[in-house]
Image (spheres, rainbow, N blue to C red):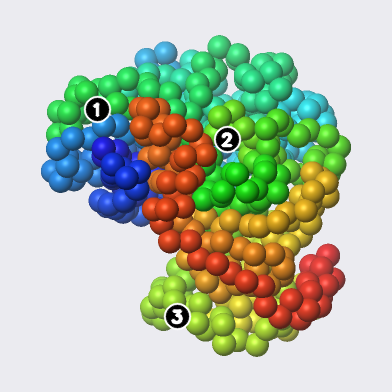
Amino acid sequence: MSLIGIDLGASNGRIIVGILNEEKRLKLDIICRFKNYGVSISNSLYWDILRIFSKIKKGLSLVAKKYKNISSIGITTWGVDFILLDENDEILGPIHHYRDSRTNGMLEEMFKVVPKIVIFNQTGIQFLSFNSSTQMFSMAYNKSPRLNITKTFLMLPDYFNFLLSGIKCSEYSDATTSQLYNPIKKDWAFDLIEKLDFKPEWFGKIIQPGTILGNIQEYIAEEVGLNKNTKIIAPLTHDTGSAVAAVPVDMNKYKRGEWAYLSSGTWSLIGVELNEPLINEKVLEYNYTNEGGIDGTIRFLKNLSGLWLIQECKRIWDKEGLNLGWDDIEEKAKDAQPFQNFINPDDQLFLNPTNIITAIKEYCKNYGQKPLESVEQISRTIFESLAFRYKQTIEDLEDIINQKIKILYIIGGGSRNNLLNQFTANILNIPIKGGPSEATAIGNILVQALALGKIKDIVELRQIVKKSFPIKDYIPEETEKWEKAYKKYLEGTK
């Protein structure tokens, strides 16, 4: 059977066909890729939603020309961003990017209306300035007229599902990223919603991943050339949710809580899969989060800065005419002198600077470190600092769940970065498995197959991933040197 996975990331989008054969092996055919980016207007940053949807339709047209029988379509996007619709289901204004400055200082103002502990106890979600709750609050705080005519709140993938199927609903995994969902009551956090002066009726029915929404809308089927009986299925629509579903872990060997995942891409998301939400003072102190997973599980994780740092550096180097490939950058970093500079990748200075390289240099200056100049030094500093940040996060995670992590699975695009993965193995001193790189699309597609009855359960789904895609092993090296450097990192980033 052939299924379409639409994978929208914060920097690019992909249309991928998954072919699941009789031997239960999955093969991916990447039909097209397209750039995704924020659009800056005055002092605001927006997503060009209509352009994204036109790219999706173009990709579906390409699929239709190559494949005759497509069973279903599923879509994933990044979390937190949302769409507001009026009574005619039309978009209210341009859609803000989560890195937009409108949320600056809003967390503190929000806590004056609803105390931090109350928000956390109702949602169990990590506090980030760009959470949907904070974005919405900034609109209420600034008396946005859009709220006066809002009739529907939809997370980003739910809106695309609405366009494709005509069905308005909210998928569980992405709804949990909003910080407006209550994982204990398993519904919207209506008490918090009302206290923040939002209307409960804006928030619709929450569905579980694997729900078949219906057939593709006829006018879209005709436009792109697909069969009108093609199903629209909601997988785990949050990209990390689908990626974690595709972790190739042997569930008969490792229990939940014994294995951890690192979804490595623009962001780094580190966590474990739990059966129930974990909401207590220690979780709040460490700023961890409870997001929705497969089969009603909880992705207990922390959201960290990721490869966006080096992506932004590469963008600047490209403008300067250096034209470095990713392998070139990795090789230069490998040859650079180790442990010379340290940064905290999650420092507010790096959230959305005008020039990331200038920001990194400013950070090093502020902390009395050596000046950074070369591509080699800057790249090495970023990769080492990310590995050290992962170490901090795993230590905190083990403290919270009172259990040692035995193995780490690195999935997503960052699983191809051999140098960073090796650095991470060195500092964690546990075995690491890297891959698959297209974990989000794989999880998306296989959850569709699960919904259609072609896969029995999550155990079989993960076995299919394991036998369908190459997984690389990373064994810890020079662990004593890395442990000494980690102490310097902790001192140098306080």
Q: Residue at x 26, y 37 (%)?
A: 1
Whether residue 214 sits left or right of residue 376 in the image: it is left
At mark 2, the secondary structure is loop
Nearer to me, 194 or 439? 439
CB within 8 Å, label 3 to label 2: no
In the picture, the disc for residue 328 is 3
Residue 284 visible (yes or no): yes
x, y percent for residue 190: 66, 16
Give the CA distance from mark 3 to mark 1: 43 Å
At mark 3, the secondary structure is helix
Answer with mark 3 or mark 1, whichever residue precedes in sequence: 1
At mark 1, the secondary structure is loop
The answer to whether residue 303 is above or below residue 317 is above
Q: Which residue is mark 2?
A: 293
Q: Residue at x 56, y 48 (%)?
A: 250
Give the CA distance from mark 3 to mark 2: 36 Å
Nearer to me, 378 or 401? 401
x, y percent for residue 227: 17, 28
Q: Which residue is mark 1?
A: 230
Q: Amino acid at mark 3?
A: Asp
x, y percent for residue 353: 59, 60
x, y percent for residue 450: 41, 32
Res 392 → quadrant = bottom right
